Amino acid sequence: MLKGLSITPPIIGRISIGRVVEKNGKRVPERDDQFSITTQIQQRGDWVLHPLHEQLRKATTRKLRAIPVRFLFNDPDLNLRAEFSCFDRDTGRPVCVGNGATCRRAGDAGIEELPCPSPDGCAFGQGGNCKPYGRLNVAIGDEDELGSFIFRTTSYNSIRTLAARLHYSSAVSGNLLACLPLELKLRGKSTRQSYRSPIYYVDLGVRTGSTLEAAITEARELDARRRAAGFDQAALDAAARAGFSNGAFEDSIEESAAVSEEFYPSDSSSGDSQRDGNPDAGASPACGLRGKLERRAALLGGKAA
């Protein structure tokens, strides 16, 4: 295993609730009210939809707002990694990653271990450069049992909700999280910081039409079949844990560039985030609305003058 290279779950596709569009010659994040399941290929600046996207959307006859998933690992923290992250907007490289207690920061002297006071109390991360950043790996369908689709987000709502659901599901199932048949769900809410406009975040629960008791029963049956076949879940979790800890930063250079564009746009007016109004595409709905209100106030002020 190459030292310094984080070994992450194989990714065969992406899940998002937003996209990057070109406006006035700039590529900026735009929110959406449904999931998009895409491949890892871009054409003309847009991610190509994965065949599963249309397959699942047709099954609902509506917008894709629920995705049936399973998880690769029993340990909730292996399926969802959430950190405070700061990216260099010019290169897309991660420069500082912390957990609120300690951080790893890239500098002229290499990678340093430093205290992490969280974005509000960190001079290095002031100005919106440091944000919560979560990565969730899920399995969709049975095409590749060790491959995963990744959902990236800087939304406090999504990170907080997914972390709670993962830990709760693991606890009530007796640490059988990897065997539970679950579903990603898109939920909406309005907040004061979003100027009462709807924002969307990702939740997790049992699949539509099922119950928690039925899901746990199915998980126990799947776990028994896997054990009988020689499937070693504990060894898989251990291998993943060792792979994640092998590098200073999880995202590769290529991935970091896409992350920087989507969640850390160079135009600060479109990339400013709200604690409870930050959608997963990276652009806060409050920003667009706030900008309109500010422009209208300035216009009215000019007329009054």
Image: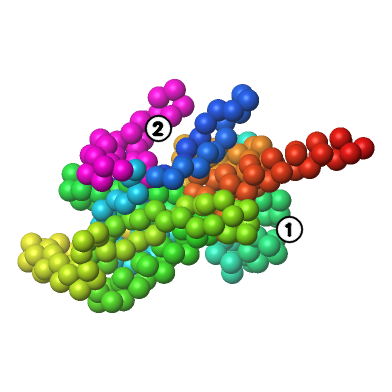
Say left or right for 182 vs 133.
left
Q: Please say if the residues under marks 2 and 1 sit with CB atoms less than 8 Å apart.
A: no
Label 2: element kind: strand
The residue carrying mark 1 is: 123
Look at label 1 and name its amino acid: Ala
Q: Alpha-carbon neighbours of circle 2 within 10 Å: few (<14), some, or many (≥20)?
A: some
As for residue 192 lying within the magenta part, the answer is: no
Colour scheme employed for the rendering of this structure: rainbow
Residue 166 placement: quadrant: bottom left
Q: Observer-nearest residue: 58 or 121?
A: 58
In primary-sequence order, the first of circles 2 and 1 is 2
Label 1: element kind: loop
User: Which residue corresponds to the image point at 27% horizontal and 64% vertical from the top-left?
Assistant: 206
Image coordinates for residue 267, horizontal then vertical, percent:
66, 37
As for residue 50 lying within the magenta part, the answer is: yes
Work out whether residue 238 can be spotted. Answer: no
In the rendered image, which quarter contains the C terminus?
Answer: top right
Q: Alpha-carbon neighbours of circle 1 within 10 Å: few (<14), some, or many (≥20)?
A: few
User: Which residue corresponds to the image point at 37% horizontal and 71% vertical from the top-left?
Assistant: 167
The residue carrying mark 2 is: 47
Residue 12 placement: quadrant: top left
User: Which residue corresponds to the image point at 21% horizontal and 61% vertical from the top-left?
Assistant: 209
Image vertical order of residue 229 relative to residue 247, above or below? below
User: Which residue corresponds to the image point at 35% horizontal and 56% vertical from the top-left?
Assistant: 185
For marks 2 and 1, give the CA distance. Answer: 35 Å
Look at label 2 and name its amino acid: Trp
Image coordinates for residue 155, horizontal then vertical, percent:
52, 55
Q: Which residues are magenta?
A: 35-62
